[in-house]
Image (tube, helix red, strand yellow):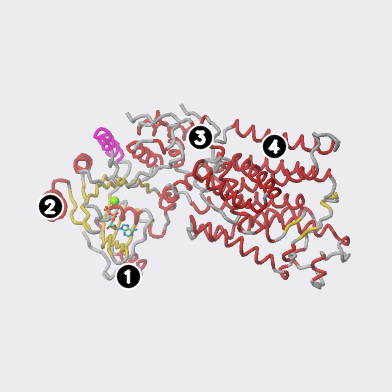
């Protein structure tokens, strides 16, 4: 798996651009056609390595679950992919042509990567409809949005999403008055509005009732195929219900990868995580 | 389905209509009560009062500008007095050149203070200010350029919160020190005064004062409508999203710094025009207009009126300044304490300002309904 993590390993002052170029020249043929390439990524905070030469590849249309104990680096990995955190070394490509490390957060969102945060972050002072409206794809510049009028197609899309996330009755309420679960749903709805090719979903069912969790699982399953979805989750039942492929992170590295049964029977995994 | 996207709370159509109606009443009745009603009548409005009201309207515009960036975009600018003063200086330069040979020294071109400093010719940056259209352009352009450069640097480096407030304050303070210097060519600590006329109309005449008041009311009305249009647009919703969760907005693909920059520049233009209208009505502009305390006072007007409601900010400016006029007449040494106390009380008990006590339909939100 880790065929071409970089060789330097000291994590400091590395010319990662050159490393990345070298890496992409050496890309093995079996890795062609992925939607996401995370390769040899290291992120350190004051010397502590939150990610340690992490490599991860996601297929188009795949639904991938990432599990791992608290502090394993799951959120940090999403931060790197979405441009919030810059890695010390490593490369992150979206398809074969988009080097994500050269883009900032808005640009990464615009190429088609959407994210749901661990702590649900909806716009508290905007209504449910307005939250969805701002998540529409399309013109994002000041002048274009200044003159934008909601089109019939956009309204229809908003209504459709409201239906899916079950917030039609709350459309006029501000984000601040929604329950925790409703905020989770609204944020998922915001992701749906964006219609990204790749969805990164950080702990979507935290704080949800069993019924809500079940609906979330159905929704994520229905998205896979059309979109690639990477889900970080703690809830093992939930993971079992949705994932075909599971990646276990531990201390910033991939500890195991495979289907749920393989992973659960892996002695390394049992030792650090499931057995604990 | 497809119910209309809701307007922002507190700037409903009704509120806007009342605000503009009030402005229209001021713009119509004050001129009549000043010009047509004889001075002996108790209904007569003196020229002093006319100028005072005109001044309040300029302050209201400045409050609108601050509310746009602070109330809606979350940028607590403590430097808006600088934009106001720069607009005022642009107008002042035009008025100085209108004096022509009527100055104390009687020089055909040079303002008195330049003659006094033994300058032989007009500095290059004074060229063109004898033309009113040039001056008008500069009233907006100079504040806009300063806001553009400052905002570009600050927002691009993602300076936010208290740090941003401090550097806006520093900007204003630095400009004040610069304008205090005689060799800057802006009249040093005396600034500009003794204006004679504007477009040939004597500034001491009642008619001119009344026209200035009407212009201020119109400018305030236009600024209000422009701000309201921005705030009610999709861009306005992005701006409020930035205020609530800046980094989240980036992950939706919006370039936050460019939204902040345009709002900041537009706000600086409103402040500049307000300053330009203010100067002929008060008859003086000097570096004290840049004083840090001035910018802070504007923030208090906005907080008192109701941050995030445009008409609230404007009304806050008028109310606080009306009180200030009263206090500085009756108990001048108490004013700053009174203002500070007012700010603390409003912050503690009226977080939404005076607009928070006005019952609004939008405020009565229904209880959240549990998800199905
Ligand atoms: N901005 C930061 N500064 C310092 N340490 C951080 C920062 N972000 C994350 N970490 C640390 O990195 C590790 C991985 O965190 P995170 O990616 O949030 O883990 P997970 O999402 O898997 O629970 C944790 O030990 C966390 O304390
Ligand atoms: Mg996490």
Q: Between disc 2 and disc 1, whose residue precedes?
A: 1
Mark on residue B125? none
Q: Which residue is mark 2?
A: A270
| Residues marked 2 and 1 touching at CB (< 8 Å) | no
Who is closer to the viewer here, A205 or B362?
B362
Label 4, label 3: how far apart the Cα atoms are: 35 Å
- Which type of secondary structure does the marked residue at label 3 adopt? loop
Q: Secondary structure at mark 1?
A: loop
Q: Earlier in the sequence, mark 2 or mark 3?
A: 3
* A122 to the left or right of B202: left
Residue drawn at x 60%, y 30% as measured from the top left: B14
Mark 4 or 2, which is nearer the eye?
Answer: 4
Spatial separation of the CA atoms under disc 1 and disc 4: 63 Å
State the residue position of label 3.
A151
Foreground label between 2 and 3: 2
Q: Residue B305: image x %, image y %? A: 58, 42
The answer for how far apart the CA atoms under marks 2 and 1 are is 33 Å
Nearer the observer, disc 4 or disc 3?
4
Give the vertical position of B368 relative to B115 (above or below).
above
Residue B48: say if magenta: no
Residue lying furthest top: B1
Q: CA distance from mark 2 to mark 3?
A: 53 Å
Camera-side residue of A242 and B355:
B355
The residue at which mark 4 appears reads as B23
Asked if badges 3 and 1 are on one and the same chain, I answer yes
Q: Which residue is mark 1?
A: A12
Magenta stretch secondary structure, dominant: helix
């Amino acid at each position: 798996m880790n065929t071409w993590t970089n060789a330097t390993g000291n994590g400091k002052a590395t010319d990662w651009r050159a490393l990345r170029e070298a890496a992409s020249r050496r890309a093995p043929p079996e890795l062609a056609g992925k939607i996401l390439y995370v390769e040899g990524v290291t992120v350190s905070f004051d010397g502590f390595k939150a990610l340690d030469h992490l490599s991860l590849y996601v297929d188009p249309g795949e639904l991938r679950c990432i599990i791992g104990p608290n502090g394993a680096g799951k959120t940090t990995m999403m931060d790197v992919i979405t441009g919030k955190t810059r890695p010390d070394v490593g490369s992150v490509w979206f398809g074969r042509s988009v080097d994500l490390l050269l883009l900032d957060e808005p640009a990464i969102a615009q190429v088609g990567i959407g994210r749901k945060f661990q702590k649900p972050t909806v716009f508290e002072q905007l209504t449910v409809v307005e939250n969805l409206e701002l998540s529409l794809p399309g013109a994002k510049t000041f002048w274009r949005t200044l003159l934008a009028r909601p089109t019939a197609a956009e309204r229809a899309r908003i209504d459709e999403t409201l239906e899916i996330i079950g917030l039609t009755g709350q459309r006029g309420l501000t984000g601040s008055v929604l329950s925790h679960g409703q905020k989770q749903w609204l944020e998922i709805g915001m992701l749906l509005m964006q219609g990204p090719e790749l969805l990164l979903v950080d702990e979507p069912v935290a704080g949800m009732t069993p019924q809500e969790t079940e609906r979330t699982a159905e929704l994520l399953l229905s998205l896979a195929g059309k979109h690639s979805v990477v889900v970080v989750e703690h809830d093992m039942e939930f993971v079992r219900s949705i994932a075909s492929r599971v990646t276990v992170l531990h201390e910033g590295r991939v500890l195991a990868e495979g289907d749920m049964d393989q992973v659960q029977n892996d002695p390394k995994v049992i030792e650090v995580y499931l057995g604990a | 389905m497809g119910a209309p996207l809701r307007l922002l709370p507190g700037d409903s159509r009704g509120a806007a209509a009342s605000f503009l109606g009030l402005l229209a009443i001021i713009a119509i009745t004050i001129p009549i009560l000043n010009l047509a009603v004889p001075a002996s009548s108790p209904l007569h409005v003196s020229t002093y009062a006319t100028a005072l009201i005109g001044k309040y309207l300029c302050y209201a515009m400045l409050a609108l500008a601050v509310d746009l960036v602070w109330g809606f975009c979350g940028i607590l600018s403590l430097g808006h007095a600088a934009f106001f003063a720069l607009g005022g200086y642009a107008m002042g330069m035009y008025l100085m050149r209108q004096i022509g040979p009527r100055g104390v020294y009687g020089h055909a071109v040079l303002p008195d203070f330049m003659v006094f400093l033994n300058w032989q010719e007009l500095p290059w940056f004074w060229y063109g200010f004898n033309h009113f259209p040039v001056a008008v352009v500069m009233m907006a352009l100079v504040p806009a350029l300063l806001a553009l450069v400052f905002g570009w640097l600050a927002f691009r480096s993602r300076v936010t919160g208290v740090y941003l407030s401090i550097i806006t304050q520093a900007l204003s303070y630095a400009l004040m020190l610069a304008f205090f210097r005689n060799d800057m060519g802006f009249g040093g600590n005396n600034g500009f005064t003794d204006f004679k006329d504007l477009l040939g109309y004597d500034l001491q005449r009642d008619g001119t004062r009344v026209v200035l008041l009407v212009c201020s009311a119109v400018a305030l009305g236009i600024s209000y409508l422009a701000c309201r249009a921005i705030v009610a647009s999709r861009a306005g919703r992005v701006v409020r999203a930035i205020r609530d969760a800046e980094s989240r907005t980036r992950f939706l693909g919006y370039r936050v710094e460019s939204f902040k920059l345009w709002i900041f520049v537009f706000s600086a233009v409103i402040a500049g025009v307000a300053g330009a209208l203010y100067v002929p009505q008060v008859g003086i502009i000097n570096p004290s207009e840049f004083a840090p305390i001035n910018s802070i006072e504007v923030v208090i007007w906005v907080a008192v009126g109701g941050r995030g409601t445009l008409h609230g900010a404007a009304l806050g400016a008028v109310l606080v300044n009306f009180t200030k006029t009263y206090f500085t007449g009756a108990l001048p040494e108490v004013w700053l304490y009174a203002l500070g106390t007012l700010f603390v009380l409003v912050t503690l008990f009226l977080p939404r300002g005076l607009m928070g006590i006005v019952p609004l339909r939008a405020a009565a939100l229904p209880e959240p309904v549990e998800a199905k």
